[in-house]
Amino acid sequence: MAVLGHSCGRAFPKLLKTKTQAGQLWLHSFVRNAVDILAKFTLEAHYDACWFNSLIKPNMNELVKLRQQITEMEKQAAELKKKNRPAVLAELREQMAAYRITAEELSRPAPKARPKATPAKSASPAKGKKPVVSSPAKYRGPEGQQWTGRGTAPKWLNDLVAGGKAREDFLIAPDSAASGSAVAE
């Protein structure tokens, strides 16, 4: 046993890549103690079948008892369902008659639930972010399309300009922009 622990203890620090001498010593003694304990364990014959069975049998007995309890409880649940079934059916028939529900209605699939409305966003912006301000429309097309004048011009405006019209023809007058009425021509 001493030879086994000694040879293992001498070879292990060569493989170990710790940076401190204290770490190597601690790990060396830990390995040596583990090897000694394992050797004593096997020498004293604690690993035979009797010892192993003494560990396993109580757990197996508990497992068997639990499974028996589960089957007994399942039988009790089945008996309760069988016993209460006529009363539950009578109550259901009574409620169906009171609400005039037919068996045909029960066989139809339930309507899908409507998605819940998302809560309205607060007026104050999140901390550190600027509030989003919508700009009023500056241009209005012949079919009621609107553009603020910011960003890339919309296709409807580009098509009209390419067709020979001027962009200024679609400007919304400042006084009518507030009311949202006529197009300035």
Image (cartoon, grey):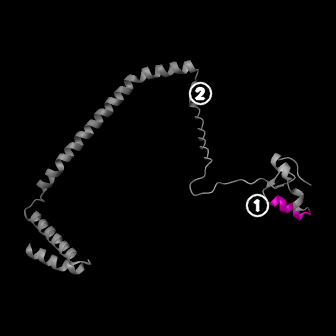
Whole-percent x, y for residue 68 in the image: 25, 37
Whole-percent x, y for residue 53 in the image: 15, 52
Q: Is residue 40 above or below residue 69?
A: below
Does the magenta run of residues contain 160?
yes
Which residue is nearer to you in this view: 84 or 130? Answer: 130
Residue at 16 percent across and 76 percent down: it is 9
- According to the picture, the residue beneath numbered tag 1 turns out to be 150
Q: Which residues are magenta?
A: 155-164
Query: Which element type, helix, strand or loop, lies under badge 1?
Result: loop
Query: Which element type, helix, strand or loop, lies under badge 2?
Result: helix
Residue at 9 percent across and 76 percent down: it is 3
- According to the picture, the residue beneath numbered tag 2 turns out to be 104
Q: Which part of the image, by quadrant, shows the C terminus? A: bottom right
Which residue is nearer to you in this view: 174 or 116? Answer: 174
Whole-percent x, y for residue 175 in the image: 85, 49
Q: Is residue 5 above or below residue 89?
A: below
Q: Is residue 175 above or below residue 97?
A: below
Count of numbered badges drawn on the protein: 2
Whole-percent x, y for residue 92 in the image: 49, 22
Please name the predominant secondary structure of the magenta segment in the image: helix
Q: Nearer the viewer, mark 1 or mark 2?
A: 1
* Amino acid under disc 2: Glu
Point out the residue furthest to the front here. 175
Which residue is nearer to you in this view: 79 or 138? Answer: 138
Q: In which quadrant of the rendered view does residue 86 lie?
A: top left
